[in-house]
Image: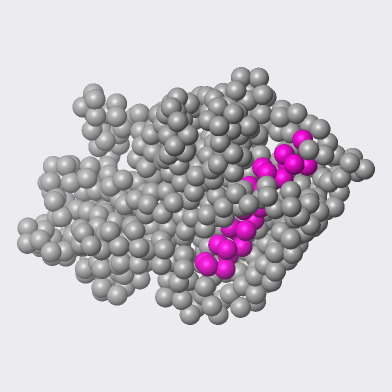
């Protein structure tokens, strides 16, 4: 498994280029599927000639335009732009084989489509060994944690920033909010780019992470407050891809049934980042100054960069098939041999490409009722998470007398809530949800929402409990226990909603998640700016209750979508209709 990861990682690709070892040498039998005894694998009429050893597991099926478009639409890398010409398919019956044009390749026009060789093609991320999938999931979680911690770890040094630059608390808080704003805006660009066949996920992940690490030096050595804020925003912007595309990477590997578990683990990693940030940065800032939490972020993300370069394989099917088509063109001499994504990319004009990258995320976000409602709800939850960074200071330092390091420890209640909810959630997936999948391994999207209906009640419980037990007469453990209910509710809501969106909008998974991240980060960036003033003016009890009443107003959303979601989904032009 380790050799496979090294071979398919960014480092492995670079080494093959340096030592002039082409990708086609990785599997010497690849060319045999397209060549017979050194003869090009197509005749003068354009028909494919298959090697004897490939005939046993291959079937030829001539299809019409409409049939091919229907099959291509069922492939893993679904596309809304299926404009495939009449083809002859060589391979399995479910779109995992090869397709070639009946037209003469020399005449141009139609193209041969290189796709998966069979249902068990080992290069298909869905067919990777389970151990490899788990390891790659761990890498995605580690990358997510390394970036997500960057928002909260700064908050530990806010007082130091105020003293060093002579600014107010609200101004110093901008270092947090601009970082969050940056990783809300970033995925709107990076997520569509990760779906481009010749880029894939890894180019976006590693390229942006390199800039993220490098720009931390500018934050540490900022000469003035404006420079600090500018580079905090830029580090958030360049660190953002995994926050939206991480879920799409998991969807690349896992079918719908096990995907919920993978998303749950990824979600826990996303929670650990902001929660452990004040703890990791608190003691460092207290003893070494505000720069040291940023140094810790640089060391952690720098290590993550090295690990990703060495071990993270590409998961995008579109990119894997693009590289395969390029490899096979060299082997067979067939210039018409292309991947499905490559054909669609060539058929797009520059204007269409720009609209696809820039406009589509916002049109999906604001014009799809399902997305707008659920994104607003998750944005509220996310905004509340960043309210904690202001309210915990007031409660545990102001009321209970904690120092900066001890105040970071108070966030462990939020973390513990995540570990408490995971076992029953996985039991629910195993006993209740998995039996509801059909014979094709698919589930009606609305069936993902019952856990969200439970989680919706946990958020107001947390806020009211936290608000009215945060007083000197009540032991400090009570508000910490209350905060754990926030994680339980947020965990159930996030996992249910993200899986629901992935099932309802499979053609636009990365873009939909990018819109979700944009909306969440907008609230996460704005809430800390008024949270401190609200808690001081209203008091902890009524400030928390105000947010609690707001969360109560959102409780009906998962129930409404569970009951009427299918009707709304079928009325959409972009949502899935066949479930």
Q: Percent from the top left, x then y, of residue 235? A: 44, 38
Q: Is residue 395 left or right of residue 253?
A: right
Q: In this view, does 17 lie to the left or right of 138?
A: left
In the rendered image, which quarter is residue 545 located in? Answer: bottom right
Residue drawn at (35%, 33%), measured in percent from left and top? 10
Q: Is residue 281 above or below residue 556?
A: above
Q: Is residue 157 above or below residue 575?
A: above
Q: What stretch is highlighted in magenta?
A: 371-397
Tell me which residue sits at (31%, 45%) in the image.
199
Residue 406 image offset from top left, x and y in percent: 75, 30
In reply to whether residue 551 is colored magenta, the answer given is: no
What is the magenta segment's predominant secondary structure?
Answer: helix
Residue appearing at x 86%, y 49% in the figure? 469
Q: Give how far across and how far down residue 188 sits, in percent.
A: 41, 54
Q: Residue at the spot x=38%, y=49% of the render?
A: 190
Residue at the top extreme of this rendering: 288
């Amino acid at each position: 498994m380790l050799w496979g990861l090294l071979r398919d990682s960014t480092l492995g690709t670079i080494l093959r280029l340096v030592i002039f070892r082409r990708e086609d040498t990785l599997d010497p039998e690849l060319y045999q599927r397209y060549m017979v005894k050194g003869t090009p694998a197509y005749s003068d009429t354009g028909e494919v000639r298959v090697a004897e050893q490939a005939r046993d597991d291959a079937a030829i099926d001539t299809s019409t335009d409409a049939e091919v478009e229907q099959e291509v639409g069922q492939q893993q890398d679904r596309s809304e732009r299926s404009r495939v010409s009449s083809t002859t398919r060589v391979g399995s019956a479910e779109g995992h084989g090869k397709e070639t044009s009946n037209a003469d390749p020399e005449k141009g026009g139609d193209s041969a489509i290189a796709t998966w060789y069979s249902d068990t093609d080992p290069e298909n991320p869905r067919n990777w060994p389970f151990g490899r999938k788990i390891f790659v999931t761990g890498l995605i979680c580690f990358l997510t944690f390394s970036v997500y911690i960057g928002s909260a770890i700064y908050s530990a040094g806010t007082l130091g920033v105020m003293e060093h630059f002579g600014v107010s608390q609200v101004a110093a808080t901008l270092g947090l909010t601009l970082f969050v704003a940056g990783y809300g805006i970033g995925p709107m660009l990076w997520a569509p780019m990760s779906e481009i066949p010749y880029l894939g996920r890894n180019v976006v992940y590693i390229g942006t992470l390199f800039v993220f690490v490098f720009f931390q030096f500018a934050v540490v050595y900022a000469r003035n407050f404006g420079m600090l804020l500018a580079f905090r925003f830029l580090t958030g912007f360049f660190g953002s891809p995994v926050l939206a595309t991480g879920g799409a990477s998991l969807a690349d590997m896992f079918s719908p049934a096990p995907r919920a578990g993978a998303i749950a683990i990824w979600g826990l990693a996303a929670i650990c980042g902001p929660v452990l940030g004040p703890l990791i940065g608190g003691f460092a800032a207290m003893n070494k100054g505000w720069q040291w939490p940023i140094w810790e972020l640089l060391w952690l993300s720098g290590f993550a960069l090295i690990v990703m370069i060495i071990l993270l394989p590409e998961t995008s099917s579109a990119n894997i098939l693009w590289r395969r088509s390029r490899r096979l063109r060299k082997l067979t001499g067939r210039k018409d041999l292309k991947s499905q994504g490559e054909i669609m990319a060539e058929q797009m004009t520059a204007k269409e490409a720009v609209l696809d990258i820039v406009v589509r995320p916002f049109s999906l976000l604001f014009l799809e009722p399902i997305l707008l409602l659920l994104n607003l709800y998750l944005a509220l939850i996310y905004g509340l998470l960043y309210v904690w960074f202001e309210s915990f200071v007031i409660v545990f330092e102001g009321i209970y007398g904690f120092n900066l390091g001890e105040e970071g420890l108070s966030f462990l209640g939020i973390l513990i809530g995540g570990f408490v909810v995971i076992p029953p959630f996985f039991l629910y997936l195993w006993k209740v949800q998995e039996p509801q999948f059909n014979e094709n391994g698919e589930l009606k999207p609305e069936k993902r929402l019952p856990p969200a209906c439970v989680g919706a009640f946990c958020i107001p419980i947390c806020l009211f409990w936290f608000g009215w037990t945060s007083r000197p007469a009540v032991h400090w453990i009570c508000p910490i226990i209350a905060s754990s209910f926030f994680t339980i509710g947020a965990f159930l809501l996030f996992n249910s909603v993200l899986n629901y969106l992935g099932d309802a909008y499979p053609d636009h998974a990365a873009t939909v998640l990018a819109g979700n991240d944009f909306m969440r980060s907008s609230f996460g960036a704005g809430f800390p700016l008024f949270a401190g003033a609200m808690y001081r003016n209203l008091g902890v009890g009524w400030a928390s209750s105000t947010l609690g009443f707001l969360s109560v107003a959102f409780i009906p959303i998962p129930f409404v979508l569970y009951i009427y979601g299918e009707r709304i989904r079928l009325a959409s032009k972009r949502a899935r209709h066949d479930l």
